[in-house]
Image (spheres, helix red, strand yellow):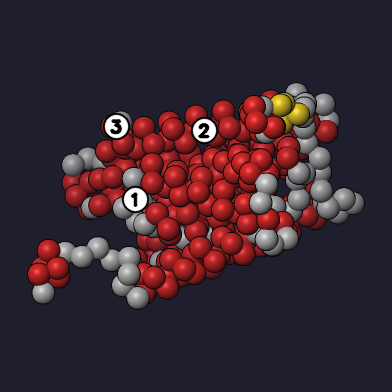
Amino acid sequence: MDPTLLAQLVLNGIVTGVQLAVLGLGMSLILNVAQRFHFAYSLTITLAAFVAALLARIGTPSILAALAGVVAAAALGGAIELILYRPLARRSGDAALLPIFVTALGLSIGGQSLIQFLWARESTSLPYELVPVEIIGLPFGLRLTTLDLVTLAIFGAIAAAGVAVLRYSRAGQVIRGVRVNPTMAAVVGIRPESVFVMIFIVASAASGLAGVFAAARYSATPSMGYDPMFAAFVIAFLAGATAPGLRVVLIGIALGIVQVVSALWIPSNLTNIVVFGCLFVYLVLKGAGVLHARTPATARS
């Protein structure tokens, strides 16, 4: 195996991984704090990409178009929680997981169809240029594009900021309190429902940014949100319900590297099989008890 090729693939995997890490952070908060099986994460990804691409096509500066896409995704995410998920959770109580999942699935499918009907009937994809793409040479024969460097800088900064906020800030303490015991959090003056809405807004904005960058790298397509959404679910599951932000980020980067490097052995359009393979192995090992920590009592017995 060519070491330079392997190093290049690892570098490309890091670029992919930092984006997956940010998506995974958002999904982890939605799953483990808000307790929503948010399949419609794919819709906010796709909506932001199309908003940015359509605005850029009519002459809007690319940065402003990208910001508009992110704002649209954040607004949609908050509206979904407020208008759909919260009333369902109140009516269904502990049995809300399935109704919310069905609602999210319907939103995802219906939203994709609506986007295709409105904006992708004549062409199944819309191009979008965020930054001029040029090749930049690196030491040891490696190279990245300008878009890769911008991706690393922006998503790396967001991932680092997310880890720091969750670990050290007052907001992070509030989120941890709501995750561990929402009833006690309400007793001390924290409104869990307000925290849920804020999580949806922030996570949806992050997913929208990922959609904008995906459109800049490939193009905006109606089904573009599904693969990153599934990857975000896998990252959240692999990290665990009580995972610190750093673990989620590291798993996201590792998954990105594994996904890209696996293209050495399987076709690039099938590398998502690796994502589900990682989840399958995790579930098998967890079901077999391999991943359960041994308590002192168990160890003595």
- Give 267 or 217, whichever is nearer the viewer: 267
State yes or no: discs 3 and 2 in contact (Cβ < 8 Å). no
How far is disc 3 from disc 1 in space, using C-alphas?
15 Å
Dot 1 falls on a residue whose secondary structure is loop
Q: Quadrant of residue 296?
A: bottom left
Q: Residues within 10 Å of mark 1 (few under 14, many from 20)?
A: some
Q: Quadrant of the C terminus?
A: bottom left
Residue 89's place in the image compared with 175, above or below, is: below
Q: Quadrant of residue 52?
A: top right
| Residue 186 x %, y % | 23, 47
Mark 2, residue position: 156
- Give 14 or 178, whichever is nearer the viewer: 14
- Callout 3, which amino acid? Tyr
Residue 30 in view, yes or no: no
Question: Which residue is rendered at x = 43% and y = 59% of the image?
Answer: 237
Question: Which residue is rendered at x = 28% and y = 40% of the image?
Answer: 174
Whether residue 93 sits left or right of residue 185 in the image: it is right
User: Disc number at residue 168?
Assistant: 3
